Image (spheres, grey):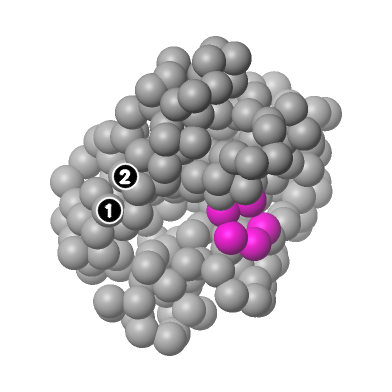
Amino acid sequence: MPYPFALPEVGYSYDALEPHIDARTMEIHHGKHHAAYTTNLNKALESHADLQKKSVEQLVTDLNAVPEAIRNAVRNNGGGYLNHALFWDVMTPGGAKEPSGALADALERDLGSLDDVKSKLQAAAVGQFGSGWGWLCKDAGGKLSIVATPNQDTPLMQGKTPILGVDVWEHAYYLKYQNRRPDYVTAWWNVVNWDKVAARFGPGR
């Protein structure tokens, strides 16, 4: 997607994830927070024609190539842009409620049962101090791991590709769950679309 970057569509109505994620939170989260990351990323790049030729993935995985004056803006807003696009996608309504096929095999191989996966990712997300994310990632060889990142950092910065992520910034859950982050993450599993996660994992890994 070329510069100027556009706010990705959610692809479903804001109330589609009720009761687990409420419509008002979705409206603010997408229409205000994600929109702000998009606007601010474009603003940071507006006088850097060379950087405008790069994808957001290229920008955040090679931050040393970004001038120091805008590096933090690109890191924070580029990460926020990518992280939220994945977040909306893996929660798309109507998909599989548990993994199957190559993804299920890889999860069992690398992380244990589905309950183990949920427990480990929940621990990473709930245990993230302050704002951040919990992730299920794959490396170049298809090996799966669970990591947490602060703020809007993406696992791409660590050489890992995120295939599932839960946002634990307070704006993702506070209207409904207040300070009960564990309750939010537990409820969030009900809206994960494992077909979308499998597509990100890829066939035959």
> Compared to 199, does 123 lie above or below?
below
Residue at image location 74% in from the left, 27% down from the top: 65
Q: Nearer the viewer, residue 32 or 145?
A: 32
Tell me: 101 left or right of 44: right
Tell me: 185 left or right of 142: left
Residues shaded magenta: 149-153
What residue does disc 1 label? 32
> Compared to 184, does 10 lie above or below?
above
Mark carried by residue 134:
none
Instruction: Reply yes or no: does residue 150 show up in magenta.
Output: yes
Q: Nearer the viewer, residue 26 or 77?
A: 77
Q: What residue type is labelled 1?
A: Lys
Image position, residue 124 (x, y; %): 67, 68
Whole-Å distance between the Cαs marked 2 and 1? Answer: 5 Å
Tell me: 173 left or right of 197: left
Residue at image location 31% in from the left, 44% down from the top: 35
Element class at badge 2: helix
Q: What residue type is labelled 2?
A: Ala
Element class at badge 1: helix
Q: Is residue 23 visible?
A: yes
Image position, residue 88 (x, y; %): 37, 45
What residue does disc 2 label? 35
Q: Main secondary structure of the magenta part?
A: loop
Q: Is disc 2 in contact with disc 1, using a CB cutoff of under 8 Å?
A: yes
Q: Is residue 194 visible?
A: no
